[in-house]
């Protein structure tokens, strides 16, 4: 085995899987939680769970 093939395999495993997995995690966070939080913050009437969380946090302080 010469230098070329291990370098290609290492580059692929390190870059493609590493960056690909990081992007997949960031995308799932965006789709699941962040986008829903932004949508809920723009509602004219806040959702019930938002009001409960605010009440719970204000009593805990």
Image (cartoon, rainbow, N blue to C red):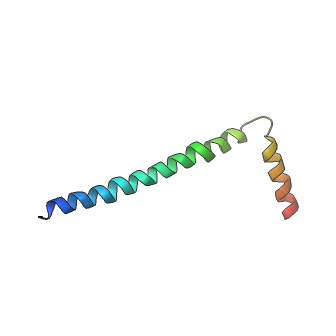
Vertical order, 2 against 22 (above or below)? below
Vertical order, 38 against 25 (above or below)? above
Q: Quadrant of the C terminus?
A: bottom right
- In the rendered structure, the answer to whether residue 57 lies left or right of residue 11 reads right
- In the rendered structure, the answer to whether residue 47 lies left or right of residue 18 reads right
Outermost residue, left side: 2
Outermost residue, right side: 59
Quarter of the figure with residue 39: top right
Viewer-nearest residue: 16 or 61: 16
- In the rendered structure, the answer to whether residue 48 lies left or right of residue 28 reads right
x, y percent for residue 30:
56, 46
Vertical order, 5 against 39 (above or below)? below
Viewer-nearest residue: 31 or 44: 31
- In the rendered structure, the answer to whether residue 12 lies left or right of residue 4 reads right
Q: Quadrant of the N terminus?
A: bottom left
Total of numbered circles in the picture?
0
Q: Residue at x 33, y 60 (%)?
A: 14
Q: Residue at x 72, y 42 (%)?
A: 41
Quarter of the figure with residue 32: top right
x, y percent for residue 27:
51, 46
Outermost residue, front side: 1
Q: Residue at x 24, y 58 (%)?
A: 9
Vertical order, 57 against 51 (above or below)? below
x, y percent for residue 55:
86, 53
């Amino acid at each position: 085995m010469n230098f070329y093939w291990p370098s290609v395999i290492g580059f692929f495993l390190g870059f493609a899987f590493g960056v690909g997995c990081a992007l997949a995690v960031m995308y799932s966070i965006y789709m699941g939680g962040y986008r829903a939080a932004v949508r809920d913050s723009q509602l004219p009437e806040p959702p019930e769970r938002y009001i409960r969380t605010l009440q719970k946090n204000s009593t805990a302080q």
